[in-house]
Amino acid sequence: MHEVGIVQELIEEITSQAKKQNAGKVTRVKVKTGKLEELTSDSFRFWFEQLSKGTISEGAELDLISTDNEGVYLEHIEMEVTE
């Protein structure tokens, strides 16, 4: 279940980037996943939902895009910025 570690690292990166932008909430996350990672979208979504509870990413919409490349990449984050 390497999805847990991958998703945990992803959430940490999202949190870091959101804090740098003074975001109050992350609303959408776009992630590219390589075919060699053997991740299922259902499992990835499940772990994202579970591990994001209580974080700035909780409730964010997750867009997964399969690519022929290796690895998992954070493509884009949409967030609400607080003044």
Image: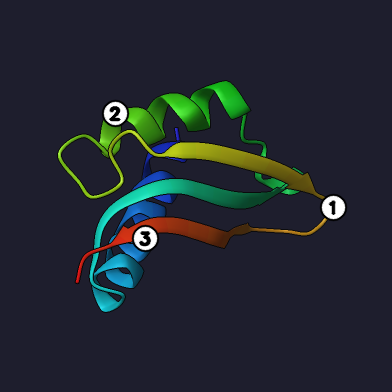
Q: Residue at x 50, y 32 (%)?
A: 44
Inter-mark Cα distance, 2 to 1 = 27 Å
Mark in the foreground, 3 or 1: 3
Q: Of residues 2 and 8, which is closer to you in this image?
A: 8
The reply, left or right, for residue 78 in relation to residue 80 is: right
Amino acid type assigned to the residue bearing label 2 in the image: Gln
Q: Which mark is residue 14?
A: 3
Inter-mark Cα distance, 3 to 1 = 23 Å
Mark in the foreground, 3 or 2: 3
Q: Residues within 10 Å of mark 1 (few under 14, many from 20)?
A: few
User: In the displayed image of the protein, which residue is found farthest to the right?
Assistant: 68
Inter-mark Cα distance, 3 to 2 = 15 Å
Q: Is 66 drawn above or below residue 68 in the view shown? A: above
Image quarter in which the C terminus is found: bottom left
Circle 1 residue:
68
Amino acid type assigned to the residue bearing label 1 in the image: Asp
Q: Residue at x 21, y 34 (%)?
A: 53
Q: Residues within 10 Å of mark 3 (few under 14, many from 20)?
A: many
Circle 2 residue:
50
Q: Residue at x 67, y 37 (%)?
A: 38
Badge 1 marks a residue whose secondary structure is: loop
Q: Position of residue 67 (x, y in %)?
A: 80, 50
Q: Residues within 10 Å of mark 2 (few under 14, many from 20)?
A: few
Amino acid type assigned to the residue bearing label 3 in the image: Ile
Image quadrant where residue 39 sits: top right
Q: Of residues 50 and 40, which is closer to you in this image?
A: 50
Badge 2 marks a residue whose secondary structure is: helix
Badge 3 marks a residue whose secondary structure is: helix
Image quadrant where residue 69 sits: bottom right
